[in-house]
Image (cartoon, rainbow, N blue to C red):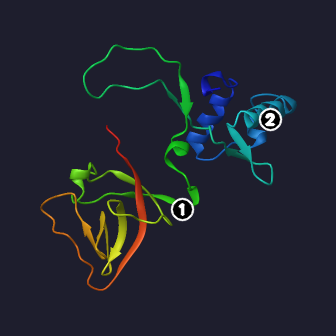
Amino acid sequence: MGITKSPKHFDKIVAFYRAHRRMPSHAEIAGLRSKGSTYKLVNRLVSLGLVERDGKGRLLPGSRFLSLSQLGTVEAGWPSPAEEELPDTMSLEEFLIVRPDSTFILKVQGDSMVEAGIMPGDMVLVERGVREKDGDIIIAEVDREWTMKYYRRKNGKVWLEAANNKYKPIYPRQELRIAAVVKAVIRKYL
């Protein structure tokens, strides 16, 4: 069940969350309804996965709290006949993040990865504790400087490679410490 079919006061809870960057208390929700009705509303939202409770009973965003409608697919090649599909919902967090405790976002500076589609000003979603493999885009400290590059390994030799021909490969002289693997690129069009 998507947000459009959830209880009508859920939209007010989401608006409160977006305005205050926190979930409302039960008392703040009670302003919408009586205490008994508020209790029933919260229980229904919990059962739908829209909100959760912490150990003290306070509200937390649930796995489907900020889910978006997924209406179908779009052809990026030749145009195709439009087909109507039933809407479904998905949470971007659920789609992009496997291990929330090990995942963070970094803002991209520089143009060394433009041919990989990573532009200055983009955000990259990275995950720590993942074993890197040849061809992964990684965040690494190489000889005491941080960078984002392709991880390359061949015949026991390791180097970092840019996705821009104006940059030469980086061969670690002293140390290479891989901090995270890039999982997604986030770009906002204004």
- Is 11 in front, or is 183? 183
Q: Residue furthest front?
A: 155
Residue ID for mark 1: 102
Disc nearer the start of the sequence (2/1): 2
Tell me the residue at 65%/26% (across/down).
1
Which amino acid is tagged 1? Answer: Ser
Q: Nearer the viewer, mark 2 or mark 1?
A: 1
On screen, 120 above or below 10?
A: below
Tell me the residue at 61%/27% (across/down).
3
Q: Quadrant of residue 14?
A: top right
On screen, 83 above or below 143?
A: above
Q: Position of residue 95 (x, y in %)?
A: 51, 42
Q: Quadrant of residue 75?
A: top left
Side of 33 where 110 appears, left or right: left
Tell me the residue at 43%/65% (across/down).
180
Q: Position of residue 177 (x, y in %)?
A: 39, 76
Q: Quadrant of residue 149?
A: bottom left
